[in-house]
Image: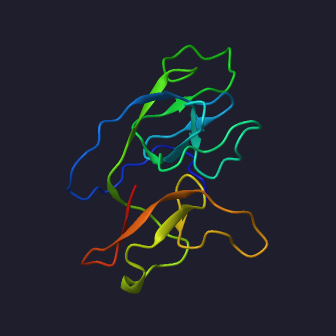
Amino acid sequence: MALQSDRILVRADGPRLRPFGLVVATGQTVFRGSIAIVFSDGTIAPAGTATPSGLTVAPQTAGIATHFQSNVANPQVMSGQYGPAPVELDRGTYALPFDTAPTWDKLGSPVYAVDDETVSLTETPSGGSARTLVGTFAGLDETGTPFVTL
């Protein structure tokens, strides 16, 4: 199920990549902790969102949104969290929920976005369209929680 509010993710220690602020695409909302993708024009949207006409998803650009930002027209709201302000996307290794629990034999396998919260080892579900590649399966911790490197 797609996120309806902010969330905080467990992050594995490791090198951090320099985040860049990117503008949320018109008509889109990203939540803190959501998986976001970058389009070819440099705007971002929640993973699992249909790619706007004339754009493509930039390869290997998925990240975790660092804060909430909505670029949906709403003249009743006056706040820095609404409008085309930039959002940084963190990259690294995160505990993310899978649609089907992965096992160690899938280590290093490509991981695809189901939506802005959930990931899958399946690129194209039966009867569905191809999902966006967001990272690789990094392994399971001692409690069985799966981690993904974005």
Quarter of the rendering occupied by the C terminus: bottom left
In the image, residue 38 sits, relative to residue 93, either above or below, namely above
**Protein image colouring:** rainbow
Q: Is residue 1 left or right of residue 107?
A: right
Indicate the position of residue 145 as horizontal and vertical percent values: 35, 72
In the foreground, 3 or 119:
119
Drawn side of residue 67 relative to residue 29, left or right: left
Q: Tag count in the figure?
A: 0
Considering depth in this image, is 32 or 138 the residue closer to the camera?
Answer: 138
Q: Horizontal and vertical percent for residue 60?
A: 47, 50
Q: Is residue 56 above or below residue 108?
A: above
Name the foreground residue: 111 vs 12: 111
Q: Quadrant of residue 141?
A: bottom left
| Quadrant where the N terminus is found in the figure | bottom right
Name the residue located 47 percent from the left edge and 24 percent from the top edge. Answer: 86
Residue under the point 47% across and 45% down: 61
On screen, 76 above or below 64?
above
**Residue 40 percent location from the top left of the image:** 60, 36
Question: What residue appears at the point 48 percent right and 29 percent down from the top-left corner?
Answer: 22
Nearer the observer, 87 or 7: 87
Residue plotted at (60% across, 30% down): 41
